[in-house]
Image (cartoon, grey):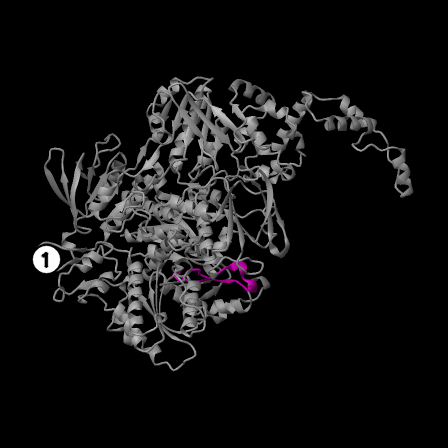
Amino acid sequence: MNSESGKHRVHTKPETQASELTERLDLQSVRSCYICRTCTSSCPVTFIDPRFNPLAILRMVLYGMVEEVLSSDFLWLCTSCYSCQERCPQEIPVADIMTKLKNKAFKLGNAPVGVKAQMDIIKKAGRIYPLDDFDNKKRAKAGLPELPTSCDVVKTLFESETESLK
Amino acid sequence: MQKEVIIVIGGGITGLTVALELARLGKHPLVVERGPLLGGRSASLPCKATDRCLKCNNCLVEDTLRQIKYDSPFEFMTHTTISDIRREAESWYVTLETGPFFIDWEKCTDCGACYEACARLGASGVVRGASINQHPFFGIDQKACSCLQKGANPACVKECPEGAINILARPQTRQVKAHGIVVATGYTPYVPPEKNRFGYGRLPNVITTQEADEMLRESGAVTRPSDGRVPQRVAFVQCVGSRDRRIGREYCSRICCGYSLRLALHMIHKYPDVDITIFYMDIQNFGKDFEKYYSEVKDKAKLVRGLPGDFYALDEGKISVSYFSEEQQKNVAQPFDLVLLTIGLSPQEENPDLANMLGLGINEDGFLRSSQADASAVVVAGTARGPMDVAECICDAKSAAFKMANFLEGS
Amino acid sequence: MTEGRVNRSVLVVGNGPYCFKVAGELASVDSVSLAVLREARLDEMERKPNLVELLMPVELLGFSGQPGEFRAVFRQTDGSHAERTYGFVVVALESEWISTLNKWSVVEDSRTTSLSKLEKYFNEYLGNIGPGDKVVFISGFKQNSYPVSQEKIVNFAAAVREKTGAATYVLMEQFKVAQEGLERAFRLARELGVVFVKFSQTIPEVRVGPEECTVQYMDEAMGQAVKISPQLLIFEDEACPPPEGRYISDLLGINLGNQGFLQGDFLFNLPIYTNRTGIFVVGSGKGPISEKEAEREAEAVAEEVAKLVCSFDKEVVGPFPRLNENECIHCLTCYRSCPHKAISLYPGQRSPQISPVACRGCGICVESCPRRAIDFEDGESGISYYGIDKEIAHIVYEDSRDVPRIAVFACVNSAYDAYLLAKSRGDRLQARCSVLKVPCGGRVEAAAVIKALGSGIDGVAILTCHEDSCKSVHGASRCRKRIAAVKEMMTKCGVKEEAILFGTVAPGSAPQFVELINRFSLRLQGRDGSSIIPGNAGSGGEAR
């Protein structure tokens, strides 16, 4: 999350808009943050891709820039490893907040193509990496048992979609 | 004229100062110290001067200890705990237990034969003062006595030419009637739990600043535990055990920025090639010349604003520390020879029991508070009340002595 | 001994409400006179029975004497002079909080104000703020900040947010949370919705003009710039020393700190002392402190006075000097040398008088007297020119030539303790040492050092406390200069200057003592191959 230092000017949003979305998504806990940077320095993704910076995301939410986060691509870099949440000295549920934001962004149709594609594959095949007969033949040759090529139980989970995704 | 005895619980810098002042005000303090020696934690504070005094306050401690050693102004008991305490009418009836394994300091001549005997066995049951002004200079750490652990008679007892070492079947008890109590039980340094991300307890070259202080005092230098060498790259991690809701320590320990930054300046002065990085959240004020110290630190050390995430073992005892670099705007991992955890001051575990026993309050951070009712009969002073440095403890002790003396005069 | 003339009353010098509190505490000890240099509100003060006199406002014109008999001259509002005698003095001046708007090139108006002004008119300011408005607090950047003033900022910001619902921002360099309950207070304010912004690399830009009032800054944690147009912009004040501080410190002969705050930076002044026995400093005049801490200091100083009243007891371990009037030539060297101003001249007295109460036994006067008219009561001549021979005799006639023979003058406050500890620990010294205890480096006579060398031993070491933590203020530095002069003289006489070592040692630091002596020993044996190692005082190195 690099700053185009100074070129990107932001006026602080009127309070009302910010708090509405923040409240609805129950993100008030971001307020406790005292900028210790433990989340960011613990984040394995920030090592690899500096576009993802948990602290910066929390600050954006704090400033009421939730929509910007929801329409961003960097939000999806979070792997839900929970290092941030485990270590936050203010006990802010950082990973859960990322998940909430991702869910909302998905609803708004902002998820990267890959995420949608993954979802479709899981729906159809019950796993991210779809197996077919070719794979099962190879498994038989190696003396491994056959695995199912589809999983209907998983499909039913999608059908009983809960309110939280709205 | 009845002697007005005041029991001072705790023989650290605060307790000793209270006792000194009360004695000079004509009262009769009795210092009760559960450890083997007087002086508390402050006795092992090292001097951190560079080419100028950094006011780490250890001179003040030495001064106080010296006065007590040469003037013997008050009565004290070491290796002693309080087993019972009762309030009746206007007095406290206190039962003190000494030992059962202890050195009778009145017979002790500080010859050190016991210490040598214990050292020959490779054990540490006999402890020695960190400062020559601690008197008594030798004492017994019962828990560390390897002879007792083996069920044998401790070797030091025979070695003592004065027969000053007692090992009794039961602790020696003494009943005292006191008119007032001063609680100066101090704090306990924060120790990271077994599972901690810093590698403390796992990686040999991750130590606390308290351990570094003791090392500096004892040997004159801070070196790597793994090979005894002078470190080239040192990391300080601030606020370990403080300002942390997760571990129930939502307070700033006040003195850590001071003592750790002084240590950093001292190390830089002594070993000009050393490279020091300080990971911090906020720098607290310390000393009256704070701005001068702070600009010197900014000049000579690298200050990184943000606490590090992971600590991994590398070859040769080095530690990889990962943190967010503001300049590069991404996470980086750097190797360090030595990591110092700047630990905070935690309230003692016994505080709730003590509070119960004496009718004291406990504040939100777990430190003791003088109770409102009958406030003057029991006064809390020093770090038992909350984090403060040595000079503040001394001031607090004087104020406590004043309150106690006033109370006695009034009653 | 001026026992008969001992006065036990206390003079409190103040400039604000705090001095009344201090006087109140002291009044329970003995009679108190309160001299207030400015008009101040009296309602904090209950009329204590022991308050003998209240002089307000008053000007302190003159000050002299010693503990137990300080003399102060005042000029009162009606122009008349009043002269009083006191046993002790407590300086309870308060520091000032000065507006910093001018540092930001901002003029105060309805949109901009200082923290102290906000405090005074809080409800009025609050009345003008509504839910859609923005309020910004700025702390630090152009001056250091303190927990005391940040506590105010946090409380006001929380109140503004709670009562008006306005968007509230607090811009800070550092969160100064080192005070009980402050970390929590900060968090509670954040939970109310106050946005705290921290800065390491940049500072906010403030633009206030007739048409605009904006604050623009880089939110470093977010990596984006933010611009706010607040309806109310509040700047933290700067803590400044009391304006009367310099004048009072000059008059009373007490040290002043670097920035003009009282008490000086001298370690042994902590917590409430000055370089003069019987004169104390309490309160924020030494630097901003919280109200609770100031209260403790008031109690602590009352205890100090009570203790001194109880018995003119001192905290000095050691003998005291006495002056031989027949030898005294009235050069006033002792008077000028005393770091504690314990030597006074009285009209009608033939010679200077050393106050036993104020004297701390450092011996600087003994060394400085050109006629040797001052000596210690117990005659510790062992370290003087006359006695040094006998003291070191036991190593002079040593036959062992495998290690050098060194006389070590060791200050009782640092090096001597270090030596005792080294001995107790069994640390190996590579020299035959005669360690001589001195009350202060300032007591070491050049003549004694030279005589010691002249006795035939191999080297002389003078080890003192670090210069700026010398208990006698300038004792160690005087010693260093003296030894440097001795070395220069010695080289002119053909004696190698390497035979004399001046070094500083931390109190009781056995490792430093051992390192210094052993390195000196190697040098004396010509075995270390290097020349004199330049001054490295803090690690117990050698200084020239």
Give the left or right position of residue C308, taking residue A166 as reference: left
Q: Is residue B352 above or below residue C442?
A: above
Is residue B88 visible in this depiction of the protein? no
Is residue B247 visible in this depiction of the protein? yes
Residue highlighted by disc 1: C349
Q: Magenta stretch: residue B225 in it?
A: no
Q: Which residues are magenta?
A: B123-147
Return the residue found at the far left: C348
Closest to the observer: A134 or B249?
Answer: A134
Return the residue found at the far bottom: C399
Q: Is residue A156 above or below residue C421?
A: above
Q: Position of residue C197 (x, y in %)?
A: 48, 31
Kind of residue sitting beneath label 1 = Gln
Q: Residues within 10 Å of mark 1 (few under 14, many from 20)?
A: few
Give the left or right position of residue A34, taking residue A78 as reference: left
Residue at 62 percent across and 57 percent down: it is B316
Closest to the observer: A143 or B253?
Answer: A143
Q: What chain does badge 1 belong to?
A: C
Q: Position of residue C268 (x, y in %)?
A: 32, 52
